[in-house]
Image (cartoon, grey):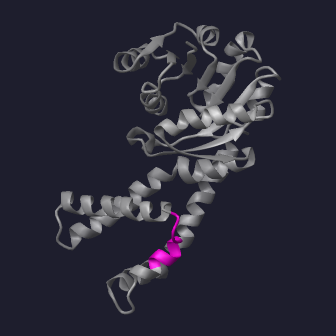
């Protein structure tokens, strides 16, 4: 029986979410390394993860290496990893702002690299992961990456040049949604709801609205028009959003995050 051996370098929040999803897949073996021994011990206690003592051990064991470390740590990790890498390895990076070209330039020029950007709703199986193919990666490598990350939600295949936008929109996006959701709930509280009631109404409404858009039957603009009665309550609320130019603020929010993602490479 053929097993797919996946090695994680870094076992933080996103890595744990992916490990949780992958641990349900058959014929999959998972190894992990983390410079924080307590983090590795924790994930190994919760999931079937084989602890490794070094980055080099991950490369020796695993066919697929998932770099789940902070962007500023990537260069140092690649320096240690480089002597153990071969063209047989598939390296998947989740580091924001780190291009496939940077990884190739700091490793070996035959390395198959896939760049991905997942997000935190992966913890509840509703993640959004952008996947980008590196120069030496094959279509089969992309398909394999998509299969792995579909275990924690949806997947979109993008060009590497689009990954900063994906980082800004879906990678950072949950924080924007939480901020909006919390603000809506505060409005509900001011109008007489309890905190729990307001949060439930806000969160379920956001979830339901998102599912309507994802059904693909109608655009957000069409759906908005259908729920807006002239002279009604929705129109009164939307007027405040328009007067305060909330649409432009959100556009600029994504743009600022994308610009910061580009800066991480400098």
Q: Nearer the viewer, residue 156 or 167?
A: 156
Name the spot of residue 36 as percent of width and height, x first: 46, 17
- Magenta stretch contains residue 221: yes
Residue lying farthest to the front in this orientation: 1
User: Is 69 on the left-hand or right-hand side of 227?
Assistant: right
Residue under the point 19% across and 57% down = 196
Name the spot of residue 229 as percent of width and height, x first: 38, 88
Residue 83 visible? The answer is yes
Q: Nearer the viewer, residue 237 or 18?
A: 18
Which of the 4 quarters of the picture holds residue 241?
Answer: bottom left
Residue under the point 60% across and 47% down = 167
Q: Does residue 97 sit above or below 259 in this rendering? A: above
User: Is 225 on the left-hand or right-hand side of 256?
Assistant: left
Q: Does residue 50 sit above or below 109 in this rendering? A: above
Residue lying farthest to the right in this orientation: 109
Name the spot of residue 89 as percent of width and height, x first: 70, 19
Residue under the point 68% across and 15% down = 81
User: Is 234 on the left-hand or right-hand side of 71?
Assistant: left
Residue lying farthest to the bottom in this orientation: 231
Q: Does residue 201 sit above or below 13 in this rendering? A: below
Which of the 4 quarters of the picture holds residue 178?
Answer: bottom left
Q: Nearer the viewer, residue 4 or 203?
A: 4
- Magenta stretch contains residue 118: no
Residue under the point 43% across and 60% down = 211
Residue 33 visible? The answer is no
Q: Which residues are magenta?
A: 216-224
Q: Quadrant of the N terminus?
A: top right
Q: Does residue 5 sit above or below 139 in this rendering? A: above
């Amino acid at each position: 029986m053929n097993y797919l051996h996946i090695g994680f370098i870094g076992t933080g929040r996103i890595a744990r979410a992916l490990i949780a999803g992958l641990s349900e897949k058959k014929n999959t073996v998972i190894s992990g390394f983390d410079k924080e021994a307590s983090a590795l011990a924790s994930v190994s206690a919760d999931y079937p993860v084989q602890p490794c003592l070094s980055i080099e051990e991950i490369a020796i064991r695993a066919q697929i290496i998932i770099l789940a470390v902070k962007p500023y740590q990537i260069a140092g990790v690649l320096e240690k990893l480089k002597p153990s890498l071969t063209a047989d390895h598939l390296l998947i990076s989740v580091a924001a702002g780190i291009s496939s070209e940077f990884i190739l330039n700091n490793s070996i020029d035959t390395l198959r690299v896939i760049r991905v950007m997942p997000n935190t709703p992966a913890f509840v199986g509703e993640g959004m992961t952008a996947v980008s193919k590196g120069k030496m990666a094959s279509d089969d490598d992309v398909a394999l990456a998509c299969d792995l990350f579909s275990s924690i939600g949806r997947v979109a295949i993008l060009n590497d040049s689009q990954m900063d936008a994906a980082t800004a929109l879906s990678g950072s996006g949950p924080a924007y949604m939480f901020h909006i959701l919390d603000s809506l709930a505060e409005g509900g509280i001011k109008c007489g709801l309890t905190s729990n009631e307001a949060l439930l109404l806000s969160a379920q409404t956001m979830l339901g609205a998102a599912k309507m858009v994802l059904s693909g039957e109608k655009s957000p603009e069409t759906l908005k028009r259908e729920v807006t009665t002239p002279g009604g309550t929705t129109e009164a609320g939307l007027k405040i959003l328009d007067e305060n130019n909330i649409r432009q603020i959100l556009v600029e929010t994504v743009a600022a995050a994308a610009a910061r993602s580009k800066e991480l490479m400098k």
